[in-house]
């Protein structure tokens, strides 16, 4: 039996002050809000761009980890994983939406700034641009370029 002074007192709680309250996130410096920790974000990005070895058929190739993850997700989607198909589709749709937003922004800038000519490699000079309606902005080459159908004006 415990000593007389350390025994529970009848009618009194064993924890009279109760459980300590958990302080909520306030956003102040030093607060541990998810995403507020810059070193954590840096580590995540370092890991995303870290080079990893991946099997490609019979060969092993090196690529950034984020590319390897997308490649694995694509393979899983192709092999019929519904979860992978749903995730892959949402990633592609989001990427296409961002690309379209950037293209529209560039288009609007060109129209607003009154760009009235483009370089014609056939004529080896700048020619007037009539309308942006039939033009496509392509970012697949690493830079932005404007592509439009060849007109009779270009061929002359």
Image: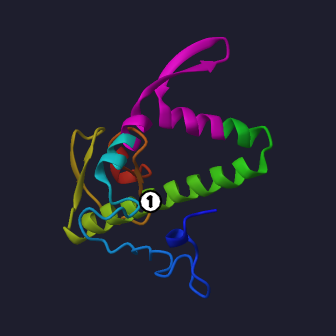
Which residue shows up at 55% across the image and 32% down it? Answer: 68
Please say which color scheme the image uses: rainbow
Q: Would you identify the image quadrant in which residue 116 lies? A: bottom left
Considering every residue shown, the one lying at the far bottom of the view is 11
- Relative to residue 28, is residue 115 depicted above or below? above
Q: Is residue 130 visible?
A: no
| Badge 1 element | helix
**In-front residue for pair 150/116:** 116
In this image, 151 relative to 5: left or right?
A: left
Q: Is residue 91 visible?
A: yes
**In-front residue for pair 53/130:** 53
97 part of magenta stretch: no
**In-front residue for pair 129/15:** 15
Instruction: Magenta stretch: give its range.
Output: 44-73
At which x and y percent is residue 138?
41, 48
**Label 1: few (<14), some (14–19) or many (≥20) C-alpha neighbours in 10 Å:** few
- Relative to residue 74, is residue 134 depicted above or below? below
In this image, 55 relative to 128: left or right?
A: right
At which x and y percent is residue 27?
30, 71
**In this figure, which residue is indicated by the disc labeled 1?**
98
Which residue shows up at 30% across the image and 68% down it? Answer: 108
């Amino acid at each position: 039996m415990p000593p007389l002074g350390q025994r529970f007192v009848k009618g009194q709680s064993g924890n009279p002050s109760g459980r300590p309250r958990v302080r909520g996130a306030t956003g102040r410096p030093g607060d541990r809000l998810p995403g507020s920790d810059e070193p954590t974000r840096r580590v995540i990005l370092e890991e995303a761009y870290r080079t990893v070895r991946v099997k490609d058929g019979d060969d092993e190739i090196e690529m950034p980890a984020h590319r390897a993850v997308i490649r694995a997700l694509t393979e899983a989607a192709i092999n019929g994983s519904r979860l992978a198909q749903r995730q892959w589709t949402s990633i592609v749709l989001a990427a296409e939406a961002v690309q379209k937003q950037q293209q529209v922004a560039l288009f609007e800038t060109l129209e607003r700034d009154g760009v009235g000519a483009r370089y014609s490699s056939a004529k080896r000079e700048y020619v007037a641009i009539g309308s942006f309606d039939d033009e496509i902005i392509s970012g697949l080459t690493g830079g932005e370029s404007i592509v439009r159908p060849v007109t009779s004006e270009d061929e002359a």
